[in-house]
Image (cartoon, rainbow, N blue to C red):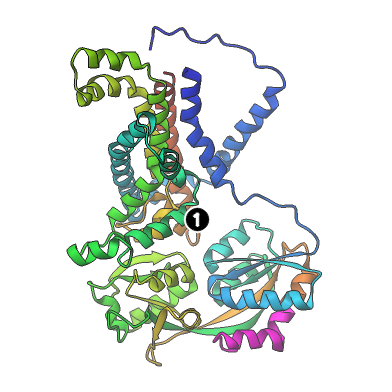
Amino acid sequence: MSLRARPLSQSPPRVLLPFALAGVALFLLPLIGLIARTPWTRLPSLLTAPVAVEALRLSLVTSVTAAAIAGAIGVPLAWILARADFPGRALVRGLATLPMVLPPVVGGAALLYAFGRRGLVGEPIYEATGLILPFSIWGVVLANVFIATPFLVVTVEGALRNLDPRFEAAAAVLGAGRWRVFRRVTLPMIGPSLGAGLLLAWARALGEFGATITFAGNLQGRTQTMPLAVYVALQQDRETAIALSLVLVAVSLAVLVALRDRLWRS
Amino acid sequence: MIRKATLLSIMPLLLTVASTACAGPEARDRSELLIFAAASLTDAFDAIQTAFAAEHPEFDVRISYSSTGSLREQITEGAPADVFASADLHNMDLLVAAGAALAPERFAGNEMQIAVPAGNPAAVTGLADLARPELLVGLVVEAAPAGVLARQILAAADVEPALDTEEPTVRALLGKIEAGELDVGILFRTDVDSTDLVDGVDIPQGLNLQTVYPIAVLTSSVNPAGARLFIDFVLSPAGQAILAELGFHSP
């Protein structure tokens, strides 16, 4: 990383400046609005209330689990999309990125019709094992994986396409099997992009709302993640909603600022 | 090469922004009327909207349905609506006290009913079934009038519900019972009547509770005359006939 020269700091073309500032204002003003409404003195008691603590715990557990699963299924999928040539690849790529543009509520409803107790796959699973995904923590994780995985796939596929194939070819010539090449050469080389992909997937899972409430429902301590708690609290207890929102903003911003430069530079 | 990778990695962010930014602000036309209505009024106000449009083509009526609690919150935050139709008196009173709504009038009544998927697969017979842990049980959030009434009824019947979800609106709960994903919930009778996919189980007379729907012009209305016409239509025999047809009581 340190071998690469840093780009010179430049003055931007003047015409770009107002647009860039408008962008900054767009992202900054809602934050200021939130902060201006924050009941600072009541913050500690609001954030230690059971509804906040349980939502925070559930959000962390489900978003981290979802990011890990997104990595486990997203990296192989990205590899196949980047490297394998097969009929219908464009269709598979479209499918794998569909949740990025689909309204999450539609995704949640589709998940319900597929994995619900009366769903296409959910019904046989329920009859064979008694397992019900909706209204459980696994329902939250599934909704998060569905929405977040495409972010990882797109990021990692891009990295794989830009990888210099000579390193993998050299390893193969030296006798490494395909799995060994993947594990010892490909994975380390796409490391930063994989990190960025995991981070994006995690951040998207942390903020997931529509698919979760539609598929997994909303119950404090079981399926009520931070965004759901904010939504419910907004209807009756605005101070709790603002306090929870502030935590979401702070956690997300801290992680994005800390890791963005490190991960996305290469 | 590096540029392309960077672009690819920020693309998801751009797409998220694009997909989240669906409800943008619109320039308000003088003849546009924005109605905020409780979710339980969905079918009734859709029908009233059609009938009103036939009589008053000069207005472009838009209706935003949500739980009474979240609509009240949006109005408090300055949402530019003309009319608010609430599923209880309490939320309307809060707006009147805050100076956001003027002189509410009662236009309909409703009562609660136990809702089960068509055919009642879990053999629900009464309120006590909501405590069965093996059933998937849903209520509406407490911020919604239907959620408040359901909890009051259960408390009076001394039933502790084995809750699996608290849905944000009556329509969200209705959808999950329709799909057979929940075994039982408590909704307004008119919600249960609105679909063949859901059956109702009556709550004993002594325990059941009623709600009253008030409607009012909002002080933020840019078109109070049009708002008044819409409310008059809801209160007129034509409007009342639509509500009665869908099972609402007179207030």
Residue corresponding to mark 1: A238
**Picture coordinates of residue A227, whole percent (x, y):** 43, 50
**Residue at (45%, 42%) from the top-left corner?**
A94
Magenta span includes B249: yes
Residue at the image position 41 percent from the left and 93 percent from the top = B205
Position of residue B240 measured from the top left corner of the image (x, y, whole percent) = 65, 86
- The secondary structure that most of the magenta stretch takes on is helix
- Vertical side of A69 occupied by A49: above or below: below
Provide residue A188's location: percent of width, then percent of height. Answer: 28, 21
Q: Residue at x 69, y 80 (%)?
A: B234
Quadrant (top left, top right, bottom left, bottom right) of the C terminus of chain B: bottom right
Residue B221 visible somewhere in the drawing: yes
Among all residues in the image, which is located at the extreme front? Answer: A87
Compared to B216, does A98 lie above or below?
A: above
**In the displayed structure, does residue A219 sit left or right of residue B26?**
left
Q: Report the magenta residues as a range.
A: B231-251
Q: Nearer the viewer, residue A241 or A14?
A: A14
